[in-house]
Image (cartoon, coloured by chain):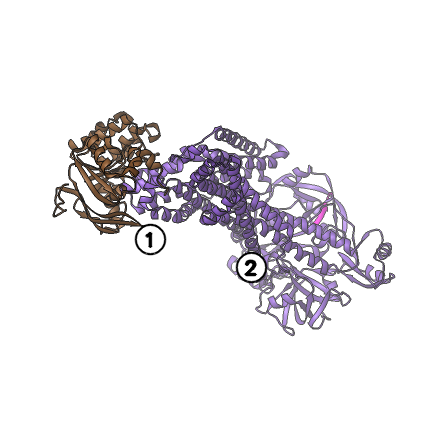
Chain colours: A purple, B brown
């Protein structure tokens, strides 16, 4: 029987191509995800290994138990250590070198006069060049030795277009400084696109450790020194306010944090791999159903000569196994190709990932197993059908339909899930679930999605009947024929449309969320911002020099900044904003819920309503704040309802300065108030001229500010549309497959239609209408579901600035239009195939 | 035998073939399904085509109906040379001038009986002549079944719907391929008498391929094929005269085929 099964695959390879492609696509995503994750992890491991090569590190104690967030496991949520400690550590026995980590933000001006910005949001780092540090080597030129000199990392040098000896500028500590490139520095590791600028240690210390504090100090052991002993000695010298950790432990800790972060990215990608495989399973099931049908007589003959049902069943499963394994093998290759392309794309943006594309036994094993398993599960039902059909029935020409009780049960279950899911979403939307609101929303959404998938077959006759009405009425008899074809097997039509439905539900929801977010942002800016102009930076950190330059202009009355730093608030790390009371008096019109904004003048804090509710804060409560340079307990003086400043807590600028070092603070936005009677247009020209040297700073009015915020949302949408593209490709495959299947089943019917005079073009039109109906049906269900669920979001997330619900009808209309295009595209091949069918073959087919 | 018309395009013939050859396959697998056939189908008659399995009777019908293309020879249908026609013209010819009744699977399962009947007109985007539609429907006795789907009709009713569909577009000629092959004798008699009446009362020309001598006896004239050639014909047949000719045509080896036509059909190789 196995031989019969394998021969059959070999002689009917064409039939199985679609199944193989389906498995291939799904597996490609799985293996590609694994490979990408391994590659990224490898790249970061390299970075960690080369950037943390010291044997022992001394770092501050933890100020909050929050994990993640902190890059490289140092700084962020720990206190700083005194730079002076470095000299003491150098005296410890067995220490060969001590390298304090003097680092901070810097902007490099490239050869074209614009800022050198890292791709993909990778940061720009300034480092103090320490000759003792064994991890960096001078590749060309020499080390920077004076404030006017810098050295650049190899790929940074390349990206900047500068050469050794070139004069340029850097933006350091908010001011532009003229410098000369004197050297090229080489790091051992890939640096994932980040920009590295090396300063001499003294200049760097002035810029980023002026208060004598650094995030950590690396200690290198002399040859033959026992690390454990060194660790104990270092800890003894460093004292109780600091923590000594071995290099190996730090690297392990950092690697674990990165793994966790990448794990999230991987999960996201795997969800899409899952969708691809889910849809792939439909395609495989359909294909096997088709081949089983076409070979019914063959099976009947095998049964007649003595094959048992289980042998027939087994032979089909063997074929499924071959399809699964072949598809998975192709999928692994395709996945590697996908990652290679991705690496090339990232590389062209300057974000280099290290090493070969990893393909370990685990990835190969999991991919093959998934491919085989999906194929086997998908083929099991058609195989069972083929095995259990009595030989005589199979010999007969007429198709026997089996619509069992299972359909009713799944329909009922679907209805229950849909209603239950919708109810959960409504309850969450109307805030009846308290803390369970978000959980209710998520669970409700998933339940509703599965419910609609199960319910879809029941919706096919009515829904498609209505959808097909215009076609049936205007294109007699083609529309009617097409309607009959898509409604005669509701389950199949529903599962075909399901592929598109899932993708469209995601995209529909994303579209609503995006446009609602944009509208919310706009309304916040319009209702709250009363300033004349705003300054924003491409690096989200407006240089203080730019702020000073603008403040010095004649037509500028006042510049008010919003500075952000990470602080521990009652033990967990949050963004804390430093403001002056004048900000609320002049630049922002913020409704006060309780307390008084004058509290800021008294050194008290202000909280947003959402944060106050979340933390159960009342005006008058005491809140413990701890930063890298100090700790303080502040009184909550006011609660405000603002969306403009997205933060947990606002404190007076002075308080923020006490708790964090200037290197840790970023100026998110500066609000510019003009003097009375100043001409707005002239002032704008003046502002633009003033910030021009700072390259990364842009001047915006409120409208442009809203536009800029909206543009950020659009960037996120691009990713979603890429995923939409993926789901469309899979959906097209599914529709092509189903059409091919139903055309194969309708061979005689098509022959009859052609015999009584249906032209080839008319036949192709029928197939195309079927295809369009299916894809529009799936799209409408998906978009409807997505929009419905997304509509509940504003009420759940109103506190997070999600205030306005906007349904982008034009965009949704475009999706439906896209569905028509998808339908037409998917119909091309099956329509041509149907039209080419020989009339006589079709009529005398037995 | 009737003499062949000197000019086949005259009005007396609804369809005719001259030197018709059809070859399937190549080399050792080559089969001459039609081996030089000359035939005239008279206008306003029910003509039956008989012959043992593999005699070429179905191939003859398929070629004359424009469903298949002949290897050589000339075919005229209603004065039109269909040997020279491309697929587009053949489609138009089938749509407007020819009606079909097949052995099985005559109806589109998703359409009602009435929709199935008017299907050729709908495809051609021609208006339905309501009086003629009523006349045809009444003639096949399906007035009360018009709203039913094929699955809700008996085999005999389905074939009668197919006959009505073949007639509703007033084709020049109706080709019926074993129209009673799947029916019990009572339903078969209903369908056959309707086909005969359509000729006698409505002036339709009908060509019917059949295995069944009783079915053939409804015809005005029966043509006999063997090995791709026209070998005999019977005017005004009765079941007995048809059986006599069949016995003469087939040697003892062929007897099983002609006496048990149904078994012979299912023994044909699967295509």
- Dominant SS in magenta: strand
The subunit carrying tag 1 is B
Task: Provide the residue designation for mark 1.
Answer: B26
Q: Which residue is at the front of the view, A357 or A434?
A: A357
- The secondary structure type at the circle numbered 1 is loop
The x, y position of residue A378, in whole percent, is 52, 40
Span of residues in magenta: A566-570
**Residue drawn at the location 76% of the way across and 65% of the way down:** A133
Does the magenta segment cover residue A581? no
Task: Provide the residue designation for mark 2.
Answer: A345
The x, y position of residue A327, in whole percent, is 53, 49
Quarter assignment of residue A227: bottom right
Q: Which residue is at the front of the view, B138 or B30?
A: B30
Question: Which-is-in-front pick, marks 1 and 2?
Answer: 1
- Kindly identify which numbered label has been placed on residue A127: none
**Residue drawn at the location 24% of the way across and 35% of the way down:** B247
């Amino acid at each position: 029987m196995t031989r019969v099964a394998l021969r059959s695959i070999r002689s009917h390879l064409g039939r199985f191509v679609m199944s193989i492609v389906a498995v291939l696509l799904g597996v490609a995503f799985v293996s590609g995800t694994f490979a990408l994750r391994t590659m990224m992890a490898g790249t970061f491991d390299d970075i960690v290994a080369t950037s943390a090569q010291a044997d022992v590190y001394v770092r501050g104690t933890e100020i909050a138990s929050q994990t993640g967030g902190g890059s490289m496991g140092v700084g962020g949520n720990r206190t700083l250590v005194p730079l002076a400690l470095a000299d003491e550590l150098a005296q410890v026995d067995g220490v060969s070198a001590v390298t304090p980590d003097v680092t901070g933000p810097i902007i490099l001006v490239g050869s074209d006069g614009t800022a050198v910005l890292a791709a993909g949001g990778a940061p720009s780092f300034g480092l103090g060049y320490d000759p003792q540090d064994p991890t960096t080597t001078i590749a060309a030129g020499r080390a920077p030795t004076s404030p006017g000199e810098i050295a650049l990392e190899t790929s940074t040098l390349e990206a900047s277009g500068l050469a050794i000896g070139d004069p340029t500028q850097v933006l350091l500590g908010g001011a532009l400084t003229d410098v000369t490139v004197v050297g090229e520095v080489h790091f051992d590791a890939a640096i994932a696109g980040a920009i590295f600028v090396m300063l001499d240690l003294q200049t760097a210390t002035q810029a980023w450790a002026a208060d004598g504090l650094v995030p950590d100090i690396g200690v290198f052991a002399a040859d033959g020194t026992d690390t454990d002993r060194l660790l104990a000695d270092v800890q003894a010298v460093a004292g109780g306010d600091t923590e000594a950790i071995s290099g190996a432990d730090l690297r392990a800790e950092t690697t674990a944090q990165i793994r966790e972060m990448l794990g999230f990215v991987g999960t996201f990608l795997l969800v899409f791999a899952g969708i691809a495989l889910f849809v792939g399973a439909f395609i495989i099931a359909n294909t096997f159903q088709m081949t089983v049908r076409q070979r019914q007589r063959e099976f009947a003959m095998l049964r007649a000569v003595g094959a048992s049902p289980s042998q027939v069943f087994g032979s089909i499963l063997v074929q499924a196994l071959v399809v699964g394994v072949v598809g998975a093998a192709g999928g692994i290759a395709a996945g590697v190709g996908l990652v290679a392309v991705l690496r090339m794309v990232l590389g062209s943006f300057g974000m280099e990932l290290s090493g070969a594309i990893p393909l370990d036994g685990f990835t190969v094993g999991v991919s093959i197993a998934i491919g085989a398993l999906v194929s086997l599960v998908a083929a099991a039902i058609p195989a069972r059908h083929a095995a259990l059909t009595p030989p005589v029935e199979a010999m007969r020409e007429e198709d026997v339909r089996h619509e069992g009780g299972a359909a009713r049960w799944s329909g009922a279950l679907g209805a229950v899930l849909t209603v239950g899911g919708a109810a959960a979403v409504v309850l969450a939307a109307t805030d009846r679930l308290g803390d369970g609101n978000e959980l209710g929303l998520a669970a409700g959404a998933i339940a509703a999605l599965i419910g609609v998938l199960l319910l879809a077959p029941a919706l096919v006759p009515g829904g498609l009947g209505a959808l097909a009405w215009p076609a049936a009425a205007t294109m007699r008899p083609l529309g009617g024929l097409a309607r009959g074809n898509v409604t005669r097997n509701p389950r199949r039509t529903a599962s075909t449309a399901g592929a598109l439905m899932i993708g469209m539900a995601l995209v529909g929801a994303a579209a609503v969320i995006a446009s609602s977010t944009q509208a919310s942002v706009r309304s916040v800016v319009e209702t709250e911002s009363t300033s004349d102009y705003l300054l924003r930076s491409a690096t989200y950190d407006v240089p203080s020099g730019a702020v000073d330059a603008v403040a010095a202009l004649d037509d500028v009355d006042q510049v008010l900044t919003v500075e952000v730093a990470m602080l521990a608030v009652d033990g967990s790390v949050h963004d804390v904003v430093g403001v002056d009371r004048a900000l609320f008096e002049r630049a922002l019109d913020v409704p006060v819920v309780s307390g008084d904004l004058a509290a800021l003048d008294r050194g008290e804090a202000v909280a947003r309503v959402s944060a106050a509710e979340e933390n159960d804060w009342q005006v008058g409560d005491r809140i413990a704040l701890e930063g890298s340079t100090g700790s303080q307990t502040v009184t909550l003086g006011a609660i405000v309802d603002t969306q403009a400043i997205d933060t947990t807590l606002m404190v007076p600028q002075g308080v923020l300065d006490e708790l964090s070092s200037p290197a840790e603070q970023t100026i998110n936005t500066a609000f510019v108030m003009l003097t009375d009677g100043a001409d707005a247009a002239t002032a704008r020209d003046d502002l633009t001229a003033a910030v021009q040297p700072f390259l990364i700073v842009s001047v915006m009015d409120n409208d442009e500010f809203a536009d800029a915020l909206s543009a950020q949302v659009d960037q996120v949408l691009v990713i979603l549309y890429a995923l939409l593209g993926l789901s469309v490709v899979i959906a097209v495959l599914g529709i092509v497959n189903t059409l091919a299947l139903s055309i194969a089943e309708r061979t005689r019917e098509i022959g009859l239609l052609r015999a009584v005079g249906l032209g080839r073009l008319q036949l192709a039109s029928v197939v195309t209408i079927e295809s369009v109906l299916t894809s529009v049906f799936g799209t409408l269900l998906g978009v409807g579901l997505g929009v419905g669920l997304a509509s509940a979001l504003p009420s759940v997330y109103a506190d997070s600035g999600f205030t306005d619900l906007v349904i982008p009808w034009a965009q949704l209309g475009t999706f439906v239009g896209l569905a028509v295009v998808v339908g037409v595209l998917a119909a091309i091949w099956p329509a041509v195939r149907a039209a080419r069918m020989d009339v006589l073959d079709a009529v005398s087919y037995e | 035998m009737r003499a062949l018309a000197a000019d086949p395009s005259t009005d007396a013939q609804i369809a005719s073939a001259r030197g018709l050859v059809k070859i399937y396959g190549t080399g050792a697998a080559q089969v001459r399904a039609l081996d030089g056939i000359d035939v005239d189908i008279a206008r306003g008659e029910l003509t039956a085509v008989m012959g043992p399995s593999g005699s070429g009777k179905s191939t003859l019908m398929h070629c004359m109906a424009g469903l298949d293309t002949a290897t050589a020879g000339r075919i005229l249908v209603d004065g039109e040379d269909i040997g020279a026609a491309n697929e587009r013209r053949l489609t138009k010819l089938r749509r407007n001038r020819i009606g079909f009744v097949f052995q099985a699977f005559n109806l589109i399962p998703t359409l009602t009986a009435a929709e199935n009947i008017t299907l050729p007109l709908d495809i051609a985007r021609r208006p339905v002549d309501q009086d003629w539609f009523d006349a045809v429907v009444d003639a096949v006795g399906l007035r009360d079944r018009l709203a039913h789907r094929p699955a809700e009709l008996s085999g005999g009713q389905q074939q009668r719907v197919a006959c009505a569909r073949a007639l509703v577009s007033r084709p020049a000629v109706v080709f019926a391929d074993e129209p009673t092959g799947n029916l019990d004798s009572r339903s078969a008699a209903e369908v056959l008498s309707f086909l005969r009446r359509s000729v006698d009362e409505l002036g339709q020309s009908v060509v019917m391929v059949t295995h069944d001598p009783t079915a053939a006896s409804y015809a005005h004239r029966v043509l006999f094929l063997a090995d791709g050639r026209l070998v005999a014909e019977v005017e005004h047949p009765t079941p007995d005269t048809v059986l006599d000719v069949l016995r003469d045509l087939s040697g003892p080896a062929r007897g099983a085929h002609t006496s048990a036509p149904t078994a012979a059909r299912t023994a044909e190789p699967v295509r």
